Amino acid sequence: MRIPLGPVPHRAKSSAAREPHILHVIQPVEGGVARFVTDLAAAQLAAGLRVTVACPRGGTLTNALRAEGCRVLPWDATGSPGPRLPGEVARLARLLREVRPDLVHAHSAKAGLAARLAVRGRLPTVFQPHAWSFETMDGVMAHAALRWEQFGARWAARVLCVSEAERRAGEQRGITARWHVVPGGVDTRRFRPEGSVARSAAGPLVVCVGRLCRQQGQDVLLRAWPAVVRQLPAARLVLVGDGPDADRLRAAAPASVEFAGPAADAAPWYRAADVVVLPSRWEGMAPGPMEAMACARPVLVTDVDGARESLPPGHLPHCLVPPEDPDTLARALTALLRRAPLRAALGAQGRAHVLAAHDVRRTRDAVTEVYRELLGVATTPFVPSQSRESITT
């Protein structure tokens, strides 16, 4: 068994060399984790791996994966552990018998819980938390989530983190694991400065792309926004996405805020923005800021796990603020909106940084190297083409 050399389409490969079969298991079907799995699966298929994804119905994930030519199997699962968990584990065990993968790669807490219970170390299993569940909870639930992660790490051949900060958070909470850090990546051919624009704005335009939920912190952004408008009355804010907090956020939003709903392709919104903001309460390493930087737009993010590592070092004074601090967020937004030359410089630097460090093909190769170690097979790394952009930036 080997991982084939070069980006040969799966259908064109000879059956003489059987490519490893990877089963990705994921529970969130929207948002950053879904986008990460879509991009990673597409890149793995392009490199010749066999890929199947098991996920719940609904959301945007299934259609996005099938558009990339990926096999998708329905796996009914809720977002939280509870009385349905035994049935969810049993359904996943049946899928494993059907798919017969060489390796299982589970994404986020719920899929990581069910997959490790279904496999129990009988197959190489990679668990990728995409932000620790115990950091999103309080009280008894947080304690139970932490105890599970401390126990369940024994059934992961690797715990794959998207940032050093995420790995440190696990280690500091007593999780003993075989760690590997692979920074998040985005499709720099899809997210680029050239292309369609969602709209042209008469005044400064701030865009926030993300699921409308407590994690993403849009409520903090709405508390900050009136101070921005007092300084820049023509400024407009667009929230792109949907989620459980949509109605509550709409009720709190002034007239200068627009709710655009979910977008199948966020790139036109990034290109339309003067500044992209993501005021998260927690993350592993959010893909949205990297997508925006790939489109050569400046980003403003909160200093949560992975944020510093996703930004070029020179961006920190302008583009990083404390979480849950609407006053500082408002001041930073206003400063960026008032300085067009700075925004242009930050955008160009961000694009170059993503090309160098966060291209999804690099992520694919780093993840595939983890698979190689676990399966004992050989790989050929991604070598970027010598395009004019890769030479000049």
Image (tube, rainbow, N blue to C red):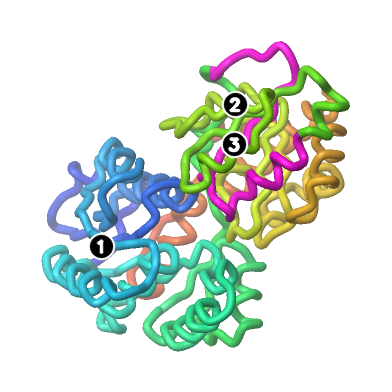
**Does the magenta portion include 176?**
no
Name the mark nearer the viewer: 3 or 1: 3
- Disc on the earlier residue, 3 or 1: 1
Q: Observer-nearest residue: 207 or 232?
A: 232
**Whether residue 375 is visible:** no
> Marks 3/2: CA distance?
12 Å
The residue indicated by pointer 3 is 251
In front: 393, or 204?
Answer: 204
Report which quarter residue 76 is drawn in.
Answer: bottom left
Instruction: Tell me the magenta residue range.
Output: 197-225
Mark 2 and mark 1: span between their CA atoms? 46 Å
Tag 2: residue type?
Glu
Among the two numbered marks 2 and 1 on one chain, the one whose residue lies closer to the N terminus: 1
Q: Under tag 2, what secondary structure?
A: strand
Q: Against 202, is 4 above or below?
A: below
User: Which residue carries the number 1 mark?
Assistant: 20
Q: Where residue 144 appears, x then y in whole percent?
A: 48, 83
Q: Nearer the viewer, mark 3 or mark 2?
A: 3
Q: CA distance from mark 3 to mark 1?
A: 50 Å
Crowding around mark 1 (Cα neighbors within 10 Å: few <14, some 14 to 19, many 20+) is: many
